Image (cartoon, rainbow, N blue to C red):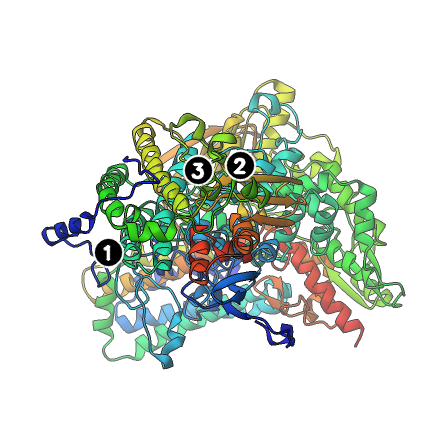
């Protein structure tokens, strides 16, 4: 670099140096628009099929340039996490910073290399655009700024949940999962983009975005407050819920590896780390000061019944719950094993509900110890929520032997403390979650008594395709030494000299017909014999509606075996409502949602 | 002049009269007003009237998430936006206690130096225009456009790159980029003679610029002058050398300085600085391919990102002087307070008033441009 | 069950002794009528929550009755029969594994469905046997057609059985 002397006077011939420019090419720039660079931040495009309407782009835009508009032609599906909202951008406000592109969970919104738009005075509205797959003017420009792994602003990997190894857990009913630490919970909660798809998907519309945010901020009590607005069974759901919210989570929709937020484990973390006293305080909030003078009877102390009772007591009514078993909880206690849901956590949920003022009468069987007519006489309304406590049987040949039992009956015995006849080897018929529960429970009992596991599970469905049980259950049960034989149908229970020796099965070639209805085809030649001292049937369940009594049964309207109800759970008999598994199902969170609906309807009815 | 501020005062008999330059005036860089009391064509006193470019950035930033501020921070200084982004990111990183990875630091240095080159090319034209010479403006802006092309290539935006993020940079360099950069530097070096002939050794310009707006070193220090303006007074103070940040302590470069502190010295310092920047860029081109690694330290999901309580003061050497960001966090997801120490605040207000006293009317514009006082930085 | 027990062996003889198409259809019609009446009589005897099963069974038998009656009186009956025999329905062995039971006083839904399945199966086998033993011609075609009808009916019942019995419980 040439140094210039401050005092240099220069030469008088200097201007002549300009003559050289006649021989040189002019420095110039082209006038028309030229191609932009490969990562240019031009106008937006949006893949309307990838976009799920989560509104993260709207939230991060610092100029409030993005508005979410409803597109009626796009199909909404709350359970899958698909909204019919799509972003529209005001280019008068947009600064083309590409933060929206980098935060989009599904990489739907991107920027192209297009950058020219002009309009006359009348057409200024043309600056407000709705990005689609084609560009602002309908041309296809090449893509400019798109999301890369470096620019991705989201944290896509779930914090791992530790689990007990199968060798450690096989001889006990201790809870399998470790749970989050505070650090892990805060990190997991920080991944949330607050889109609310989880809240829409949840049958009870739990305020998941709010309690996730509270956990992130370290305010666990506030998180529990948010949970109790919609779900008094938060200990239970924090462990065994079917987490429809996680299926809908926008983080789970990403390309490549992208895990949904572990909403269920976060709920478990918050509930475990707030004291029982505090939770009772939270549960009591909003309870009516005055008593209404109305009383309601609830039959069945399961999630549906107790949620309805909880809501109604808080509105000032008197509620008595009649439970035929020694303890409350229904299937959550007498169906779900301890290694998935420890009893003391369930006890706490129930204790909190009772502390609000719900009166539960145990060991009282309605229909036997007290009639429905009596309940109606003593109360203004009655809620039937007895669930599906009776197991179905295949009634194949030999199934009336005493060593052929139903899964729900066995599962009920374990928490009751009844002595279970633990067979050295057993075969389970059925492939749903109940079959898994009984198989894994029996495996533990076998390990405790005999030191080894010998359980075979046969199901009509095919693993990996039509199998009903959760993937986690299948994986964990295989780890625990249970052998699963899929696509096999039960033929007969073989009995020799009055002793049950095993189960015969045939191969299932196909299960569903072209219309998707059950129409199994068997291969008779492929016959297998499974040695077993006990056969356990877990093929289906039904409700013991005989407790209603003949008169009430005749009075009610029925719908294909279940009591007919309207959308609020109200039956055709004016004073009777029904909720939970017995009329709808299929899981705890739906039962809770049912309980809320029924309580709301009863309250409205009583206040008329 | 706002009508409510104007009180008609009957002065005694004198030769003095008041006019104002700006806010819209070719002799003013940006939007800025300057009230002059003149006696003939000598300025008796001057009063700076800032605020026409006040967009309320410091308040705006308090209402936006940490990540959203990235999009508005470059707009505080229009010709030289990169140091704004880098200083903000550095301040937030300091509060968070994280560091950008080494490759990101090299890329940031490259971005800063390129931005300095672009800003100085712009300034040459501006300064020359105040002396009535308009050709350097066209040359400067045209060459700057080639630099902006490079910015477009690796950051995605030409002027406001919005490329930095606390934790690093947002995008990896495209392939062949360093080759393009090298070609551009060759081109700029080849233009050195042209610029020298046209502007820097052009006696018409030199005679105008010499002696105009002269500052002594002690006056400069008292007025808080920094940057090329201070270096033109003889003091080789440069944040890159005296308080190294990013990777400047690994790079070789000189700090150019001049003795006389007038407009001509200042533009000479800028000229030398431009070529020092080219020298730094060449070193970066050589070193960068061998520096591997990530370009970003992960930060939490920006929609739920609480920066812990703390404060930080991060300063960089921009083309105008010492630029600093003072960021205060109260543990929330938005800044509690952000203060920008724009170097032009000192130059355009007190220095300009000081230098205007006794100057000729036609030199006032030149003084402002030679100080490279950029009103967007003053008003924010 | 007693009515049909008698029907089993005696009706076989009854059918085998017929030769004309119309006479065969007469017997089929009377069978469907018997079943329909049996189910209809059961309607008030079962509990209201499962009454819908017998109601639907009675309805289906009524439809069969109507079909066979209309066939009997249709002049173009022969063409119809041919078509049916060319596309037989498959015979799944599902009902094989379901036992034939005595219905008793207060049958539950599973018992009723098992009985209905057994009945359809037996009827189907019956017509099948007749078809195998009949000489080629109008007679054999008639028996084939009746066998296919019963097989279809049985298939529908199997689907209904699964929907009711293999349901209820978490996730179902």
- Chain identity of mark 1: A
Whether tag 1 and tag 3 are in contact, CB under 8 A, the answer is: no
Which mark is on residue A263?
Answer: none
Q: Is residue A103 left or right of residue C73?
A: right
- Chain identity of mark 3: B
Do circles 1 and 3 both sit on a common chain?
Answer: no
Q: Which residue sits at x=30%, y=79%?
A: C73
Which mark is on residue B259?
Answer: 3
Q: Quadrant of the C terminus of chain A?
A: bottom right
Callout 1 secondary element? loop
Q: Quadrant of the N terminus of chain A?
A: top left
Which mark is on residue A35?
Answer: 1
Q: Is residue A520 left or right of residue A343?
A: left
Disc nearest the viewer among 1 and 2 = 1
C142 or A115: nearer the viewer: A115
Q: Which residue sits at x=72%, y=50%?
A: A302
Which mark is on residue A473?
Answer: 2
- Can you see residue A513? no
Which of the two discs, 1 and 2, labels the residue nearer the N terminus? 1
Q: Which residue sits at x=37%, y=80%?
A: A121
**Marks 3 and 2, Cα distance to the nearest angstrom?**
81 Å
- Can you see residue A454? yes
Crowding at dot 2, Cα within 10 Å, few <14 / some 14-19 / many 20+, comes out as some
Do circles 1 and 2 both sit on a common chain?
Answer: yes
């Amino acid at each position: 670099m040439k140094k210039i002397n401050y005092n240099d006077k220069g030469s008088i011939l200097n201007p002549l140096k300009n003559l050289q420019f006649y021989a040189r090419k002019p420095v110039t720039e082209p006038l028309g628009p030229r191609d932009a660079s490969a990562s240019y931040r031009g106008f937006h495009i949006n893949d309307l099929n990838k976009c799920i309407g989560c509104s993260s782009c709207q939230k991060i835009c610092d100029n409030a340039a993005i508005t979410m508009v409803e597109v009626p032609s796009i199909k909404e599906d709350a359970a899958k996490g698909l909204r019919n909202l799509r972003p529209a951008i005001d280019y008068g406000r947009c600064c083309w910073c590409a933060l929206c592109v980098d935060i989009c969970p599904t990489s739907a919104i991107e920027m192209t290399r297009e950058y020219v738009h002009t309009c006359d005075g009348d057409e200024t509205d043309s600056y407000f655009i709705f990005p689609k797959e084609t560009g602002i003017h309908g041309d296809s420009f090449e893509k400019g700024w798109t999301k890369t792994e470096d620019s991705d602003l989201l944290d896509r990997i779930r914090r791992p949940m530790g689990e007990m190894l199968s060798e450690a857990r096989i001889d006990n009913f201790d809870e399998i999962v470790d749970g989050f630490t505070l650090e892990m919970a805060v990190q997991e909660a920080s991944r949330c983009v607050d889109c609310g798809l989880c809240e829409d998907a949840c049958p009870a519309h739990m305020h998941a975005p709010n309690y996730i945010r509270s956990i992130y901020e370290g305010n666990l009590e506030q998180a529990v407050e948010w949970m109790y607005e919609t779900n008094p069974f938060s200990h239970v759901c924090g462990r065994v819920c079917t987490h429809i919210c996680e299926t809908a989570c926008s983080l789970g929709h990403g390309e490549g590896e992208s895990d949904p937020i572990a909403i269920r484990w976060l709920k478990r973390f918050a509930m475990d780390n707030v004291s029982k006293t505090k939770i009772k305080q939270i549960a009591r909030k909003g309870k009516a000061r005055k008593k209404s003078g109305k009383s309601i009877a609830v039959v069945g102390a399961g999630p549906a019944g107790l949620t309805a009772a909880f809501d109604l007591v808080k509105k000032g009514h008197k509620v008595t719950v009649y439970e035929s078993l020694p303890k409350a909880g229904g299937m959550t206690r007498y169906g779900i094993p301890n290694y998935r849901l420890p009893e003391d956590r369930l006890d706490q949920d129930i204790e909190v509900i009772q502390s609000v003022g719900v009166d539960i009468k145990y060991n009282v069987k309605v229909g036997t110890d007290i009639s429905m007519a009596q309940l109606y006489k003593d109360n203004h309304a009655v809620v039937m929520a007895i669930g599906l406590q009776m197991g179905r049987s295949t009634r194949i040949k030999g199934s009336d032997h005493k060593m052929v039992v139903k899964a729900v009956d066995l599962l009920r015995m374990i928490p009751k403390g009844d002595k279970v006849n633990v067979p050295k080897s057993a075969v389970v018929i059925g492939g749903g979650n109940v079959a898994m529960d009984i198989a894994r429970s029996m495996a533990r009992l076998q390990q405790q008594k005999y030191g080894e596991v010998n359980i075979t599970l046969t199901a009509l469905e095919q693993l990996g395709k039509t199998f009903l049980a959760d993937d986690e259950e299948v994986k964990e049960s295989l780890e625990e030494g249970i052998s699963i034989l899929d696509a096999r149908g039960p033929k007969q229970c073989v009995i020799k000299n009055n002793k049950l020796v095993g189960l015969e099965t045939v191969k299932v070639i196909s299960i569903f017909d072209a219309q998707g209805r059950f129409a199994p085809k068997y291969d008779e030649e492929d016959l297998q014999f499974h040695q077993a001292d006990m056969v356990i049937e877990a093929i289906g369940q039904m409700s013991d509606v005989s407790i209603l009594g003949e008169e009430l049964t005749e009075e009610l309207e029925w719908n294909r075996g279940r009591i007919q109800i309207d959308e609020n759970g109200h039956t055709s008999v004016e004073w009777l409502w029904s909720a939970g598994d017995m009329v709808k199902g299929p899981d705890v969170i739906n039962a809770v949602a049912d309980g809320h609906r029924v309580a709301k309807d009863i309250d409205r009815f009583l206040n008329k | 002049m706002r009508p409510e501020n104007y009180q008609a005062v009957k002065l005694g008999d004198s030769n003095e009269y008041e006019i104002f330059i700006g806010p819209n005036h070719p002799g003013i860089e940006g939007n800025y007003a300057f009230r002059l009391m003149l006696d003939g064509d000598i300025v008796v006193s001057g009063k700076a009237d800032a605020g026409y470019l006040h967009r309320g950035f410091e308040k705006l930033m308090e209402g936006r998430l940490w990540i959203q501020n990235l999009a508005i921070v470059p707009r505080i200084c229009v010709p030289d936006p990169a140091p704004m982004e880098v200083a903000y990111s550095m301040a937030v990183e300091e509060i968070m206690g994280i560091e950008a990875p080494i490759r990101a630091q090299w890329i940031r240095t490259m971005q800063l130096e390129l931005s300095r080159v672009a800003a100085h090319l712009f300034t040459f034209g501006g300064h020359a225009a105040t002396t009535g010479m308009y050709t350097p403006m066209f040359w400067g802006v045209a060459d700057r456009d080639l630099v902006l092309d490079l910015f477009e290539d690796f950051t995605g935006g030409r002027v406001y790159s919005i490329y930095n993020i606390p934790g690093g940079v947002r995008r990896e360099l495209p392939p062949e980029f360093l080759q393009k950069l090298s070609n551009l530097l060759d081109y700029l070096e080849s233009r050195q003679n042209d610029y020298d002939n046209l502007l820097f050794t052009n006696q018409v310009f030199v005679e105008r610029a010499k002696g105009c707006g002269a500052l002594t070193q002690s006056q400069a220090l008292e007025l808080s002058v920094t940057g090329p303006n201070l270096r033109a007074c003889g003091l080789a103070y440069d944040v890159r050398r005296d308080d190294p940040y990013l990777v400047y302590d690994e790079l070789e470069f000189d700090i150019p300085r001049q003795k006389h502190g007038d407009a001509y010295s200042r533009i000479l310092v800028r000229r030398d600085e431009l070529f020092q920047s080219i020298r730094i860029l060449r070193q970066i081109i050589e070193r960068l391919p061998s520096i591997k690694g990530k370009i970003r330290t992960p930060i939490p999901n920006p929609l739920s990102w609480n920066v812990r309580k703390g404060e930080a003061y991060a300063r960089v050497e921009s083309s105008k002087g010492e630029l600093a960001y003072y960021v205060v966090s109260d543990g929330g997801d938005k800044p509690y307070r952000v203060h920008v120490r724009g170097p032009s605040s000192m130059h355009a207000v007190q220095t300009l008033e000081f230098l205007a006293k006794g100057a000729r009317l036609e030199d006032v514009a030149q003084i402002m441009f030679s100080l490279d006082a950029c009103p967007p930085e003053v008003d924010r | 069950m007693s009515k049909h027990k008698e029907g089993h062996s005696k009706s076989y003889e009854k059918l085998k002794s017929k030769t004309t198409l119309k006479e065969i259809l007469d017997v089929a019609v009377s069978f469907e009528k018997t079943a329909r009446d049996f189910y209809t009589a059961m309607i008030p005897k079962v509990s209201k929550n499962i009454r819908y099963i017998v109601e639907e069974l009675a309805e289906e038998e009524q439809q069969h009755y109507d079909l066979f009656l209309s066939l009997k009186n249709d002049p173009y009956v022969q063409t119809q029969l041919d078509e049916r025999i060319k596309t037989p329905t498959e015979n799944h062995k599902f009902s094989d594994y379901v036992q034939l039971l005595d219905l008793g006083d207060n049958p539950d839904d599973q018992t009723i469905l098992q009985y209905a399945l057994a009945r359809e199966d037996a009827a189907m086998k019956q017509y099948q046997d007749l078809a195998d033993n009949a000489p080629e011609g109008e007679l054999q075609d008639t028996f084939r057609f009746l066998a296919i009808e019963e097989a279809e009916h049985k298939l529908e019942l199997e689907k209904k059985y699964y929907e009711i019995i293999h349901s209820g419980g978490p996730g179902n």
